[in-house]
């Protein structure tokens, strides 16, 4: 997860494509199109910090989870979010499968206090 967040901050859109799991919906789209969109997003946002709050080892299906708070800003507006991400190893490395986002304003307490167990469904 940290490497993907860093890739957004460094605008490494090709790396973000590479770290998508083959089952991720964007993998069914043309690579050049997805990379262009990822690059545009990264260029229009700032990424001042990441807090990894919890993680879970792979389950019986090989899916590992990470819970993190991503600090993200767009033209001075706070676009930060909490995400529970699913990753699966593809034989080469861990790849991003999917994620569930929550905005800090929609949480009962501070984002950093969440765990995978307390993450709201």
Image (cartoon, grey):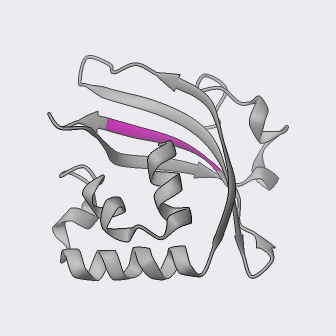
The residue at 85%/37% (across/down) is 109
In the image shown, does 42 or 69 lie closer to the viewer?
42
- On screen, 106 above or below 15? above
The residue at 40%/80% (across/down) is 37
In the image shown, does 97 or 40 lie closer to the viewer?
40
Instruction: State whether the magenta stretch is mostly helix, strand or loop.
Output: strand
The residue at 78%/30% (across/down) is 113
Q: Position of residue 48 (x, y in %)?
A: 71, 59
- On screen, 13 above or below 112? below
Q: Position of residue 10 (x, y in %)?
A: 51, 66
Q: Is residue 61 left or right of residue 106?
A: left
Q: Which residue is farthest right?
A: 109
Q: Position of residue 7 (x, y in %)?
A: 46, 59
Name which quarter of the figure residue 26 lies in.
bottom left
64 part of magenta stretch:
no
Q: Position of residue 92 (x, y in %)?
A: 17, 38
- On screen, 121 above or below 19? above
Which residue range is magenta in the image? 82-87
Q: Is residue 65 left or right of residue 20?
A: right
Number of marks: 0
Q: Which residue is farthest front?
A: 10
In the image shown, does 110 or 1 lie closer to the viewer?
1
Q: In which quadrant is the C terminus drawn?
A: top right
The residue at 52%/25% (across/down) is 55
């Amino acid at each position: 997860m940290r490497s993907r967040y860093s890739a957004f901050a460094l605008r490494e859109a090709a790396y973000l494509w590479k770290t998508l799991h083959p089952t991720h919906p964007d993998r069914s789209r043309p690579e050049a199109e997805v990379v262009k969109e990822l690059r545009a997003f990264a260029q229009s946002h700032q990424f001042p910090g990441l807090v990894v709050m919890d993680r879970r080892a792979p389950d019986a299906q090989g899916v590992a989870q990470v819970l993190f708070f991503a600090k993200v800003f767009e033209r001075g507006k706070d676009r930060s979010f909490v995400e529970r991400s699913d990753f699966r190893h593809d034989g080469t490395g861990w790849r991003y499968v999917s994620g569930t986002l929550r905005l800090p304003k929609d949480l009962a307490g501070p984002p950093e206090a969440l765990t995978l167990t307390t993450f709201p469904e």
